[in-house]
Image (cartoon, grey):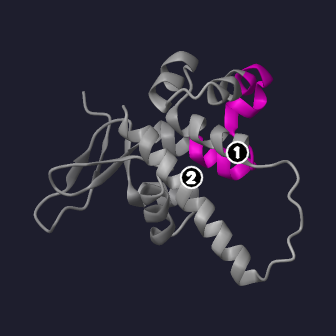
Amino acid sequence: MHTGHSVPGNGKKPLEVPAGMVTRIDVQRILGVSRTMTRKLEEGGKLMATIDANGLHLFLRSDVIELARIRGRGVVGRAAESPKVAQMLFDMFERGLELPQIVMESGQSPVTVRAMYEQYRTPLRRKRSPLSDDSAAGELKDAAQQFQQMLTRLSGER
């Protein structure tokens, strides 16, 4: 029984999208973002794609829905609603566990774990910096690169 959907192909015939998966266009619609932002989310590790034989980028619908919930509410979905889940994840971050261990032990999705890690790493109060905008932008870029390296390391150890 097929429960997926079709997308236009390369002029020959429509390509089948497996059940539970969505394309970049679906991601754009669900998240309400542009094609560029969708690619940035993918490149930044916020969404993990599987690329099929036709070059079609496919995402787990559940991951996209969870990211939509996170972005739409400005919180970290179910984990933010449960202080016990947040406490458990923060403890795992403190212990230095890697992404696969955290996902398996907590039962939370990688998207939730990554989002909670961002919350864990963000100070509650940021001091106003007398730095110029260029300096602050440079610091932000450095911090983003460090964070991306950590996510890459965590994702690569699956």
Which part of the image, by quadrant, shows the N terminus? top left
Q: On the rendered structure, is 92 left or right of 23? A: right
Taking the spot 53% from the left edge, 61% from the top edge, the residue there is: 145
Taking the spot 31% from the left edge, 39% from the top edge, the residue there is: 4
Which part of the image, by quadrant, shows the C terminus? top left
Q: Is 110 in the magenta? A: no
Residue receiving disc 2: 147
Query: At which x and y percent is residue 125?
Result: 88, 53
- 44 up-or-down from 156: above or below: below
Query: At which x and y percent is residue 109?
Result: 52, 31
- 87 up-or-down from 54: above or below: above
Total of numbered circles in the picture?
2
Residue receiving disc 1: 121
Label whose residue precedes the other's in the sequence (1 or 2): 1
Distance, label 1 to label 2, CA atoms, is: 9 Å
Magenta-highlighted stretch: main secondary structure? helix
- 71 up-or-down from 131: above or below: above
Name the amino acid type tagged 2: Phe
Q: Which residues are magenta?
A: 66-87
Q: Give whichever of 100, 81 is nearer the camera.
A: 100
Taking the spot 77% from the left edge, 30% from the top edge, the residue there is: 81
SS label for mark 1: helix
- Local packing at callout 1 (Cα closer than 10 Å; few below 14, some 14-19, many 20+) is few
Q: On the rendered structure, is 53 left or right of 97? A: left
